DNA sequence: GTCTATAGGCTGATAGAC
DNA sequence: GTCTATCAGCCTATAGAC
């Protein structure tokens, strides 16, 4: 690998994080290798490790970013004064926009399934609870509504992760339509993009 | 390791599958090792591989079993003629009973996050759709009700995987109570058992 | 049916040059 | 800031004995 252009550390960190989000998403924490992330980021394996200290630190940072992006998107949705739509509708649309980024979607799932891990569990718990409080206290949802909203989100996560929207199966289409409220356009194009 | 008692192959397979369900659940497919599974099953690493051909085959079998257990439990819940309770209530209770087995719960989450995998994705998709059809065609739920039921299940998965039921946080308790419909007893005792 | 031994491959991290 | 080289460890799978 020929030496790359020197780039400010902060900027390089961002591109590593972007690559890591995709690779960790596809393979999971244990399944992903620092070498795969390095290749995706266009740098050497050793540099990935050096930039973040360890693979685990890098994953925790990716996880933290994913949660922060959700919080930011929800805050914007709450703040938006969009005439016709309810807060729930704005929040739902914001969530679907966000997890059309498969890196974020899959990061979330991996965080959940590593809930018992000493390093990642706390990130997942505190992130999930911050989002719950945001829905309840800032968006003004009742505990029941907040819970329902989260439940719908978790089902969307699942059907998208399983790629049920990509099947020919009409029952799958029926389910995905129910889950996403008919707002499938984004994921169809996503699937098409992934094929090419 | 001294040679163990000779045991019929079928029986040995079951004990390996039981051990694998726990270890795969805790560490994920890539994170778990055949040696950890062997230790949990009380046999040698080589024998685990020999008994199933490969680690991947073993995982696929674990995944298949988890889905089948859910189907069986739901069929029983549908068939049960339990005076006071609705089908939804019976199904919900059956689900909560089932995923109190953390091995099954976490197996599910790992299947979801491996939805893109060539070997595991198909198992996840066909299993999920079989369960959807069961809810719709055998339990008689409308597509909307089936979708809501699944959504609630996915939220329960998440809060249990994150172990939010184990936190002192009162907000977490509020959320878990909403998600599980107040039926927390099983998970408390589970947590206590895990501590000991 | 079950084990021991080990080959062969991959991985995260470190050292050190530029 | 970035790379090459490399080590030490771990992991799956196979071979072969009992």
Image (cartoon, coloured by chain):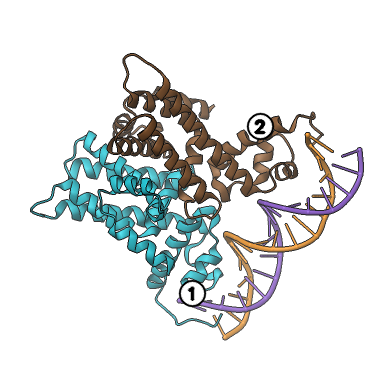
Chain colours: A cyan, B brown, C orange, D purple
Residue B174 lies, in percent from the top left, at: 29, 31
Give the CA separation, mark 2 to mark 1.
Answer: 45 Å
Residue A138 lies, in percent from the top left, at: 18, 45
Numbered disc 1: secondary structure: loop
Above or below, comparing residue A51 to residue B25 in the picture: below
**Does the rendering let one see residue A5?**
yes
**Does the rendering let one see residue A114?**
no
Numbered disc 2: secondary structure: helix
The picture quadrant where one finds residue B165 is top left
Q: Chain of mark 2?
A: B
- The quadrant in which the N terminus of chain A is found is bottom right
Front residue of D7 and A159: A159
Closer to the camera: disc 2 or disc 1?
2
Above or below, comparing residue B171 to residue A160 in the picture: above
Residue A59 lies, in percent from the top left, at: 46, 56
Residue that sits furthest to the top in the current view = B83
Q: On the rendered structure, is A82 left or right of C14? A: left
Residue drawn at point x = 44 percent, y = 54 percent: A60
Q: On the rendered structure, is A150 left or right of B133? A: left
The picture quadrant where one finds residue A136 is top left
Residue drawn at point x = 32 percent, y = 46 percent: A174
Residue B178 lies, in percent from the top left, at: 29, 31
Q: On the rendered structure, is C6 left or right of B110? A: right
- The quadrant in which the C terminus of chain A is found is bottom left
Residue pointed to by mark 2: B15
What's the mark number on residue A42?
Answer: 1
């Amino acid at each position: 690998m020929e030496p790359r252009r020197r780039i400010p550390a902060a900027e390089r960190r961002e591109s590593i994080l972007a690559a890591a989000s995709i690779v960790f998403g596809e393979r999971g924490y244990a399944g992903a290798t620092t070498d795969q992330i390095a290749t995706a980021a266009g740098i050497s394996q050793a540099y990935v490790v050096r930039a973040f200290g360890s693979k685990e630190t890098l994953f925790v940072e990716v996880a933290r970013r994913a949660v922060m992006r959700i919080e930011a998107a929800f805050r914007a949705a709450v703040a938006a004064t969009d005439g016709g739509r309810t807060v729930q509708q704005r929040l739902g649309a914001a969530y679907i926009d966000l997890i059309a980024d498969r890196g974020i979607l899959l990061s979330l799932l991996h965080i959940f399934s590593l809930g018992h891990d000493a390093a990642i569990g706390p990130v997942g718990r505190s992130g999930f609870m911050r989002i719950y409080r945001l829905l309840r206290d800032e968006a003004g949802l009742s505990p029941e509504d907040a819970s329902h909203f989260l439940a719908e989100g978790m089902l969307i996560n699942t059907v998208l992760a399983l790629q049920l929207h990509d099947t020919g199966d009409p029952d799958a289409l029926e389910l995905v339509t129910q889950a996403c409220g008919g707002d499938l356009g984004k994921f169809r194009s996503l699937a098409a993009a992934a094929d090419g």
